[in-house]
């Protein structure tokens, strides 16, 4: 299938829908500071490309309910998958060659490398937790996870990952997801607690981690 041409403004709309930050045309227009007419034209174009679809919200008072927009499966696939098919094949080949125990050792070695890399790029433990979590989110976004940080109050933060570029691989090897949690804990250190409170593979729309001082 030919890759659809997505204009910059349309990509910004897709990003908003991916994050769940806005769903109606009015909300999207306000968030991006565009006109309602312009947003509706972009949404129509994206719908024709098969990248988005709409459904009517439940009525709230008088008037016609606003349409809520979301990404289609094709729209989801416009985000990076880190060569999902190759990764899955490598997982299967590794499992066949060295068994489940050997595969787990590979995952653990990868996790140690991730921890070391994050520690090198994150601010030191003496920096504020906010700075450190935001730096981690920046690294994760660079890797394709579309991460953001939301302050939850009382010194706690949510690390939200709106996209999983290794989703297919994680479905084939659950140890990859388990290691992600330990990687965050290792990167941020023993003075910080990290708990996963939403999980894409459990049917949630995104992965969410609550991070706080221990």
Image (cartoon, rainbow, N blue to C red):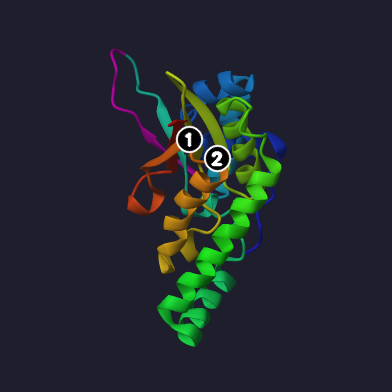
Q: Residue at x 70, y 45 (%)?
A: 120
Residue density around tag 1, few if under 14, some if 14–19, many if 20 or more, within 10 Å: some
Which span is picked out in magenta? 51-62
| Image: 129 above or below 190 | above
The x, y position of residue 127, in whole percent, is: 64, 27
The x, y position of residue 35, in whole percent, is: 62, 19
**59 part of magenta stretch:** yes
Q: Which label belongs to residue 149? A: none
The residue nearer to you, when weighing 164 against 39, is 164
- Which corner quadrant holds the N terminus? bottom right
- Which corner quadrant holds the C terminus? top left
Numbered disc 1: secondary structure: strand
List the residue tagged with mark 2.
188
**Res. 163 in view:** no
List the residue tagged with mark 1.
192
Left or right position of 209 against 120: left
State the image quarter where residue 165 is shown: bottom right
The residue nearer to you, when weighing 80 against 24, is 80
**33 part of magenta stretch:** no
Instruction: Assess whether mark 2 and mark 1 are in contact (beta carbons under 8 angstroms).
Output: yes
Cα distance in 3D space between marks 1 and 2: 6 Å
The residue nearer to you, when weighing 21 against 188, is 188
Left or right position of 4 against 211: right
Report the number of numbered marks.
Answer: 2
Numbered disc 2: secondary structure: helix
Q: Residue at x 48, y 35 (%)?
A: 192
The outermost residue toward the top is 62
């Amino acid at each position: 299938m030919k890759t659809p041409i997505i204009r910059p403004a349309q990509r910004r709309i897709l990003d908003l829908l991916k994050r769940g930050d806005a769903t109606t045309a009015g909300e999207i227009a306000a968030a991006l500071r565009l006109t309602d007419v312009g947003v509706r034209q972009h949404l129509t174009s994206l719908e024709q490309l098969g990248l988005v679809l709409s459904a009517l919200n439940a009525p709230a008072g008088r008037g016609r309910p606003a349409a809520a927009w979301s990404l289609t499966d094709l729209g989801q696939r416009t985000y990076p998958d880190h060569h999902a098919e190759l990764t899955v094949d490598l997982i299967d080949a590794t499992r066949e060659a060295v068994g489940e125990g050997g595969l787990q050792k590979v995952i653990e070695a990868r996790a140690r490398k991730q921890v070391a890399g994050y520690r090198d790029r994150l601010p030191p433990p003496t920096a504020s937790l906010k700075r450190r979590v935001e730096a981690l989110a920046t690294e994760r976004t660079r890797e394709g996870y579309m991460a953001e940080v939301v302050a939850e109050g009382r010194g706690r933060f949510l690390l939200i990952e709106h996209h999983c570029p290794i989703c297919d691989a994680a479905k084939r090897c659950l140890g990859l997801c388990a290691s992600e949690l330990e990687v965050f804990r290792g990167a941020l250190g023993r003075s910080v607690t990290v708990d996963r409170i939403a999980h894409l593979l459990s049917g949630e729309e995104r992965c969410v981690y609550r991070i706080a001082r221990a």
